[in-house]
Image (cartoon, grey):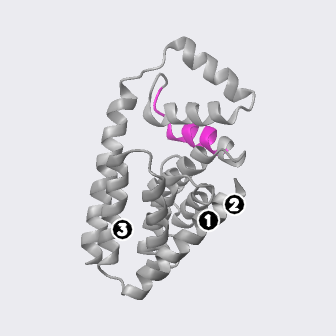
Amino acid sequence: MMKGFKFLFLANLSVVFVCSMVIYASQEPTPTEVAEILALAEQGDAEAQNELGSWYYAGRGLPQDDTEAARWIGLAADQGHVPAQYNFGLLYFRNRGVDGNDAEAAKWYRRAAEQGYAPAQGALGYMFAYGAGVEENAVMAYMWLELARNGATDEFTRRLYAQQRYELAQRMAPAEIAEATRLAQEWEAARSRQR
């Protein structure tokens, strides 16, 4: 059952990655845009640093360079930029520009997930489902996948998280699912009070 869930999760992740890359690749930055983002990034603008790192990662408007991607994304992540925290975790998880380290990936995913960033919540759910960088915990995996599903900004992604959550539920006891659902509801209620 675990292998089926892992395969489904990785297949779904690949679909999201390919679809986003098709959209992303069609928006090649001009040399002027690259110069503007570089100037902002060098001034410490976290959003520009993350964008510049993403361009290095994908080879968009700049030569593809994982080390430069990690440098710029890491600078933005250290400033608390939530998408950069997720991206930095992804670099650690994929061994791109940094030495692969699941514990470090989980740490960065958690930072973004705790701020309500759905892609990081889904990634952290995956880490808990397989014990990658964290202790395996189906309840926590389900909770984070539930939060990711609830926070997804489009129907396609929402369905992917729901499917991953469903596959995970097939290997859980009803009491574990109830506990995970309760934890997700408590997390959302606490987050709503903070806003």
The CA distance from mark 3 to mark 1 is 20 Å
The CA distance from mark 2 to mark 3 is 26 Å
User: Does the segment drawn in magenta span residue 72?
Assistant: yes
Residue denoted by label 2:
193
Q: Do the residues labelled 1 and 2 touch (CB within 8 Å)?
A: yes
Q: Nearer the viewer, mark 2 or mark 3?
A: 2
Secondary-structure class at tag 3:
helix
Residue denoted by label 1:
189
* Nearer to the camera, 45 or 161: 161
The CA distance from mark 1 to mark 2 is 6 Å
Secondary-structure class at tag 1:
helix
Which span of residues is magenta-colored?
Answer: 63-74
| N-term-proximal mark, 2 vs 3 | 3
Give the quarter of the figure containing the N terminus: bottom left
Q: Which is the main secondary structure of the residues drawn in magenta?
A: helix
Q: In this view, does 14 lie above or below 69?
A: below
Residue at position x 40%, y 30% from top?
24
The numbered dot on residue 165 is 3
* Nearer to the camera, 140 or 21: 140
Q: Nearer the viewer, mark 3 or mark 1?
A: 1
Residue 139 in sight from this viewpoint: yes
Give amino acid for label 1: Ala
Which corner quadrant of the image does residue 35 belong to?
A: top right
Residue at position x 53%, y 46% from top?
97
